[in-house]
Structure formats: structure tokens, C-alpha cells
Image: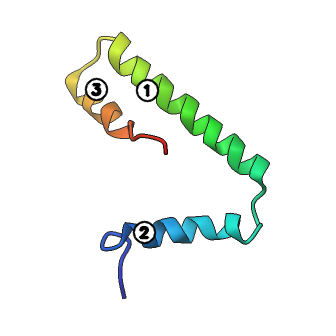
Amino acid sequence: MTSFADDPCARCEEVLQPYLDRELSEAYCRKRYRFEAHLRRFVRQAVVAEPMPPELKARLAQLRTPLL
């Protein structure tokens, strides 16, 4: 059995299934996407604007993955 660590596409496929099967609405997914986009923008701004301990800055930077 392949784990998600071995095949990250398997995890992506798993989480997309409810949307593709029409169990989730486009409006719901759009709302979640907007929330993620706003959160990531906030994190990017916070890392740049606020003086903070290097450990916290590194943890926040790890959250900043690009949105496709």
C-alpha cells in the first residue's frame, strides 16, 4: 500500500473526490479558497512587517506555500 508521503498525488486525489462527486458545492469551495488566500496574504505581511522571534518567523514562513 502506498502512503501519502510516497505519493502526494494520492492525497490530492482523495481530497478532491467529494468535489468531483458533487458532494461539495462550488460556492463552498470558493469560500474556502478565499479564506486560505486571505490567510496566506496575512501571514506574508506579518512575516515582513512585524519584528518577531526568528523561530516564529520560520514557522510562519513554512505556512507560505503558493496557491495554484
Disc 2 residue crowd, few under 14, some 14–19, many 20+, Cα 10 Å: few
Point out which mark residue 57 bears.
Answer: 3
Residue contact between numbered discs 2 and 3, judged by CB atoms under 8 Å: no
Decide which of 22, 1 is in the foreground and name it: 22
Tell me the residue at 24%/20% (across/down). Answer: 53
Q: Depth-wise, is mark 1 or mark 2 nearer the camera?
A: 2
Tell me how far mark 1 sits from mark 3, CA to CA: 10 Å
Which amino acid does the dot numbered 3 rest on? Answer: Lys
Q: Is residue 29 left or right of residue 39?
A: right
Q: Is residue 65 above or below residue 17?
A: above
Q: In the structure shown, which secondary structural element does the residue marked by tag 2 occupy?
A: helix
Q: Is residue 52 left or right of residue 46?
A: left
Which amino acid does the dot numbered 2 rest on? Answer: Cys
Tell me the residue at 40%/24% (across/down). Answer: 44
Q: Is residue 20 above or below residue 42?
A: below
Whichever of labels 1 and 3 marks the residue nearer the N terminus, that label is 1
Residue 39 lies, in percent from the top left, at 53, 31
Point out which mark residue 43 bears.
Answer: 1
Whichever of labels 2 and 3 marks the residue nearer the N terminus, that label is 2
Residue 24 lies, in percent from the top left, at 75, 60
Whichever of labels 1 and 2 marks the residue nearer the N terminus, that label is 2
Tell me how far mark 1 sits from mark 2, CA to CA: 26 Å
Q: In the structure shown, which secondary structural element does the residue marked by tag 1 occupy?
A: helix
Instruction: Give the image quarter of residue 21.
Output: bottom right
Residue 61 lies, in percent from the top left, at 31, 32
Which amino acid does the dot numbered 1 rest on? Answer: Val
